[in-house]
Amino acid sequence: MNDLLVSGFHKTLWILKDYLPVIVIGGGWAPFIYHRYLLGNKGHETIRTRDIDFMVPLNVPVIGNKTVDQVLVEAGFEAVFKSRDIPPIIHYEGNIDNMDVEIEFLADQTGSNTDIVLEVQKGLHAEALRFISIVIDNVTEVTVDDSVSVGHPSPLIVKVPTPAAYIFHKGLVFRRRKDPEKKAKDLYYIFDIITGCSQIVPAIMDDFTRLSRKYPAWFKTFIGNLSLYFETISSDGVLWVTEQRPSFAFEGLNMEQFKQFVLATFSELLTDLFKQQRF
């Protein structure tokens, strides 16, 4: 694993430590947290992007005497405009310990609201996306216990979606992606959690039962999405997951064997998901 990348992530968390109680970590860093801190498997390699996704509520309280925008700018991040919308999409970009870090804030797009960007705190713009409520409302707290390695003396408590909520969300949003690589990453993250977190798969399945009752219509869509993309060995979903396979993953399997493994993994997952449906 890229130590600089991990160090940059840890330092970013410390910069935002006062706001961690209202932030949910998503994107490619959520599986990293599941493996490294929830399960204590610090040797597991995951795929990630350099950017960090933070999910936030529609109204972020000011904690202390500084807004999130002020905290990040004072730490050396630059607010970079990513759109011409009003308000614009803004990402925060900075160099932390020789590692380029990009932060994006996301919030839930509710009801008939068509706003692309919401100002959730003075100066803090979050891109509004459907289904974000799933990962904000269904979270677990995890202790990041090796922050001392990057110069900080105490652990941090962070929030991530429950693994089932994370998988549920990814299974809903991947079809909405315009970028094919992001679609593929969404599906690989699901595959990585199911195959790499076997100790908690029973708990994940139990949580799916709860989620299926809480979001029955979305759960039906979730199952339909995965079913469509994992019908056969030649389905797009199998191809996309295979394309995202890192060189270090399942080294004992050749390409054809890996494809069979991917199909079998999602087929078994779908069999279990169908059992959870409550219409």
Image (cartoon, rainbow, N blue to C red):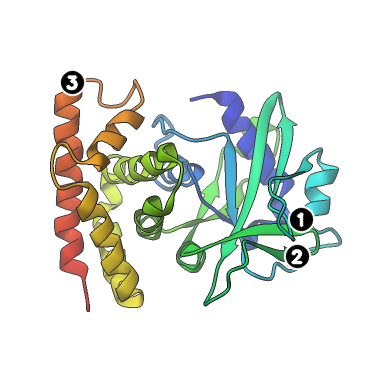
Judging depth in this view, the residue of 133 and 97 nearest the camera is 133
| Mark 2 neighbour class, 10 Å CA radius: few under 14, some 14 to 19, many 20 or more | some
Residue 204 x, y percent position in the rendering? 30, 58
> Which residue sits at x=29%, y=65%?
221
Name the front one of labels 2 and 1: 2
**Label of residue 254 in the image:** 3
Judging depth in this view, the residue of 174 and 72 nearest the camera is 174
Q: How far apart in space, not on screen, are marks 2 and 1 (Cα)?
A: 8 Å
Look at the numbered disc 3 and give the secondary structure of its residue. loop
The answer to whether residue 226 is above or below residue 3 is below
Whether residue 36 sits left or right of residue 202 in the image: it is right
Image quadrant in which you'd find residue 59 = bottom right
Identity, as a three-letter code, of the amino acid under mark 1 = Val
Residue 79 x, y percent position in the rendering? 77, 45
- Report the residue marked by disc 2: 121
**Label of residue 68 in the image:** 1
Of mark 2 and mark 1, the one earlier in the sequence is 1
Identity, as a three-letter code, of the amino acid under mark 3 = Asn
Q: In which quarter of the image is the C terminus?
A: bottom left
Q: How far apart in space, not on screen, are marks 2 and 3 (Cα)?
A: 50 Å
The answer to whether residue 180 is above or below residue 43 is below
